[in-house]
Image: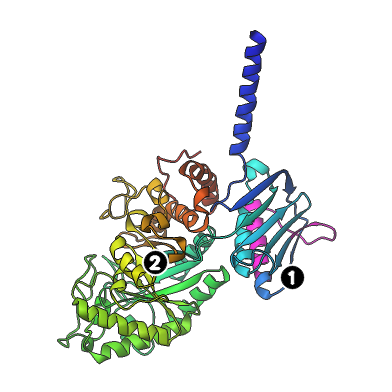
Amino acid sequence: MKKFVSWIACFAAISLLVSCQEKQAISIMPCPVSVEETGKVFKLSEKLNFKAAGSEEVQQIAGFLKTDLSQRSGLTFKESEGARSIVLTIDQAVLPQHPEGYQISVTENQVTLKANSCAGLFYATKTLSQLMQIQTFGLGFPTCEIEDYPRFAYRGAMLDVCRHFFDVDDVKRYIDLISDIKLNTLHLHLSDDQGWRIEIKSWPELTNIGGKCQVGEGDGGFYTQEQFAEIVRYAAERQITIVPEIDMPGHTNAVLSSYAELNPDGKKKEPYRDIKVGFSTLDTSNELTYKLIDDVIREISALCPGPYFHIGGDECNKTEKDEYVKFMNRVMQMVHKYGKRVIGWEELANAEVDSESIVQLWRGKENAVIGLAKGAKVLASPAGHCYLDMQYDSTSYIGLHWIGYVEVDKAYNWDPSEFLEVGDDRIVGVESPLWTETVVTFDDIEYLVFPRLVGHAEIGWSPRESRNWEGYQSRLVRYASRMEADGVDFYRSPLVPWK
């Protein structure tokens, strides 16, 4: 009997060891489609060659990877004859049905990253960087085979720079952080009641006057066209498309405070520093309004090579519905004229949307269902799960809670197709908006965004069947050490067993 008990104890110990080893296994955010571990380690050393044949963009991606691994490992890599290699290759035969997909093969002597596009190759480098889990594997990568590709084509974050302005360096920092979790879109909310944030050369007062205000105290600010082009370039190098938004016909007090002739009474509105919404509207009967809009779309479209232009359209309480529909129909034609695809907040579904239109759900299903019935695609941003400006709980030092509190589990435990009760083919993707009424510093951004955005990134990327809260928590704990290394001031939810 004692022998039997001892064998039970031994078996339990072995089981515990296996369990612990499983907890130490490869941990990637977002969760990849397929990972096969082979039980050994590729050791990093200063003698390591980075081989990237092909275009300048491929060479640049290899350079990003080399810099990232050097900073995270503390090693200074030196090209050396006969040294082991990390090889980056564009191969059209790799996952041809998945334009952002990639494959990684890690053996003891070589790491190979393959993709059919530069986007896929870039995402492969992000996964490889996460494989260097120093506490588990030391300075190296676990040997493995990975195949991976995203669930949705559009995986985005939105940054409101109107309520509080954030400069070019802040936006670049945000781009760096969201690219690490394989997001591919940054939606910039560039105009609102409180401020106009992008230079329009044909209408200079938009920034001379409209750009000099924000919520509460402070002088606001704006991007020159040269600065905005730099943001677009920096994002593109990191496989992120900038989506510009000019909100209309509501949320337009900054415009109305800049040009008296756009107001029905010919008088400028006073600058606005509060956060209430729904009180402003463009004069939809004034042809000068459409001249301004055409010029704005033309100038911004010339700066943004991406396919999208966001025309807002939400909370237009001062615009009659018939006038709203006529206005949005006309503006959509302007967007098409400049070769862009229209995105609008969910109220846009009441206009003449079609299969090329994207309706951004934010409040509920009603307008999204209307849009879907007309053939439009939906961009899922349900506020109760996706709005990053919501407080985590009553103790959050910043944020709002008009839709309720959004803890880390609530941000993760939902699914776009289940929410809308439609197939993935009707959903263009997922986007996480951060409105900045209470957000003043970049630390504020980091606190509200992370770790909730990490969960949203996984919803947009990973197969639905591979996602579960328990596994996610375990990987999030691992990812926290990466956020700490990157200086991210993230929220330590009591629902997550942080180390």
For mark 2, give the secondary structure.
strand
Q: How many tags in the picture?
A: 2
Tell me the residue at 19%/71% (across/down).
317
Percent from the top left, x then y, of residue 179?
Answer: 53, 62
Q: Residue furthest right?
A: 82
Q: Is 129 in front, or is 47?
A: 129
Q: Left or right of 81: which side holds 311?
A: left
Quarter of the N terminus within the rendering: top right
In the image, the segment drawn in magenta is 59-86
Percent from the top left, x then y, of residue 54?
Answer: 72, 73
The quadrant holding residue 388 is bottom left
Tell me the residue at 68%/44% (across/down).
138
**Mark 1 or 2 closer to N-term?**
1
The quadrant holding residue 164 is bottom left
Q: Residue furthest front?
A: 373
The quadrant holding residue 287 is bottom left
Q: Left or right of 188: which side holds 18?
A: right
Q: Left or right of 292: which side holds 478?
A: right
Q: Is 391 in front, or is 184?
A: 184
Between circles 1 and 2, the one closer to the viewer is 2
Q: Which residue is mark 1?
A: 53
Q: Residue furthest left?
A: 265
Amino acid type, label 2: Val
Q: Which residue is mark 2?
A: 378
Amino acid type, label 1: Ala
For mark 1, give the secondary structure.
loop
Percent from the top left, x then y, of residue 393?
Answer: 31, 46
Tell me the residue at 65%/56% (across/down).
69
